[in-house]
Structure formats: C-alpha cells, structure tokens
Image: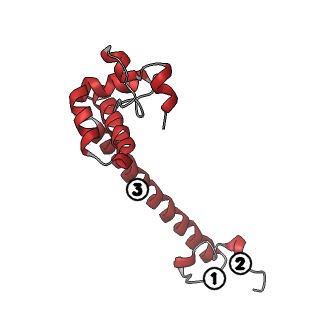
Amino acid sequence: MMASSYSSSPCAACKFLRRKCNQDCIFAPYFPPEEPQKFVNVHKIFGASNVSKFLNEVLPHQREDTVNSLAYEAEARIKDPVYGCVGAISVLQKQLIRLQKELDATNADLISITHQGSISLGLGHVDHSNAFLNYPSNLSNDM
C-alpha cells in the first residue's frame, strides 16, 4: 500500500506515540505521516492499544474500512461527545422528514393548480395520477 512511508518517515501513529516505525507497523498503511490529526482523534477516543487490537482482529482487506469507521466515529465523538455519529444521523433523519413533508406539500400544490387549470378550461374531471401530462400547457391543441 504505502511501502514508501515505512522507510522515509514514521507513520502518524508512530510519530505521535514517539516510537520507531518498523516495516511491519500495523498503523503505517492506514495513518500516513501527512494525516496526523486522523490518528490523534482515533487515539483520543479509542486508544492506540485498542486500535491495534481492532486491526489485528479483522481480515487484512477489512482494515482500511475499519480505520475509516474509527476515524469517522472519533471525529463525530470529538464534535459531539454525547451522541457522536448518532447525533449526525438524527439530524439528517429530521432533515429528510422535513424535506419529505415539503415535497408532499409541493406535489399537493401542483395537483391543486393542475386541477384548477383543468376546470377553467372546461376539461372536467382529470386523472391526477399523470398531473403533469394533463397540465394545460402540455395538452395538445386538438380540442
């Protein structure tokens, strides 16, 4: 992955922990020297020992996703120590509900406008399941 970082400079974890970064460093592929804050956050929330255990317990192809999840959760915990990423999810769910209500209201307004336009043209009952197709400006001039 990042073989060049093993020899050139210590990974962010080893630099932070003030230890020698070896060729077999479990942290090096996932905490490059140019991203020190990523390890600082993860270390603050989970501790280096726990992160090392996590990485050793998962399959090698799952390690990058594991580190990304830990980094995301750590950043969320630092921003919101009580709720962490659950707080962010809650905010997004509330926003989704609000936007769905807004969309429903807009669709209801569109159907109402379409219905009013149909009546004023003397078209009578209009199937609102295809309200856009029945909108007066979209009707053919064959009447």
Residue found at the far top of this picture: 18
Q: Secondary structure at mark 3?
A: helix
Amino acid type, label 3:
Lys
Q: Secondary structure at mark 1?
A: loop
Looking at the image, residue 124 sits to the left or right of residue 24; the answer is: right
In this picture, is 102 found above or below 80?
Answer: below
In percent of width and height, residue 111 lies at: 53, 69
**In percent of the image, x 23 and y 30: which residue is there?**
46
In this picture, is 12 found above or below 52?
Answer: above
Separation (CA) of disc 1 from disc 2: 11 Å
Dividing the picture into quarters, in which one does residue 127 lie? bottom right
In percent of width and height, residue 97 lies at: 36, 53
**In percent of the image, x 35 and y 36: which residue is there?**
72
Q: Which residue is denoted by mark 3 in the rendering?
A: 101
User: Considering depth in this image, is 76 or 65 the residue closer to the camera?
Assistant: 65
Q: Which residue is denoted by mark 1 in the rendering?
A: 123
Dividing the picture into quarters, in which one does residue 39 lie? top left
Residue found at the far right of this picture: 141
Q: Earlier in the sequence, mark 2 or mark 3?
A: 3
**In percent of the image, x 50 and y 59: which residue is there?**
106
Q: Which residue is denoted by mark 2 in the rendering?
A: 139
Foreground mark, 1 or 2, reads: 2
CB of mark 1 within 8 Å of CB of mark 2? yes
Q: Residues within 10 Å of mark 3 (few under 14, many from 20)?
A: few
Q: Secondary structure at mark 2?
A: loop
Q: Earlier in the sequence, mark 1 or mark 3?
A: 3
User: Considering depth in this image, is 58 or 141 the residue closer to the camera?
Assistant: 58
**Quarter in which the C terminus is drawn:** bottom right
Amino acid type, label 2:
Leu
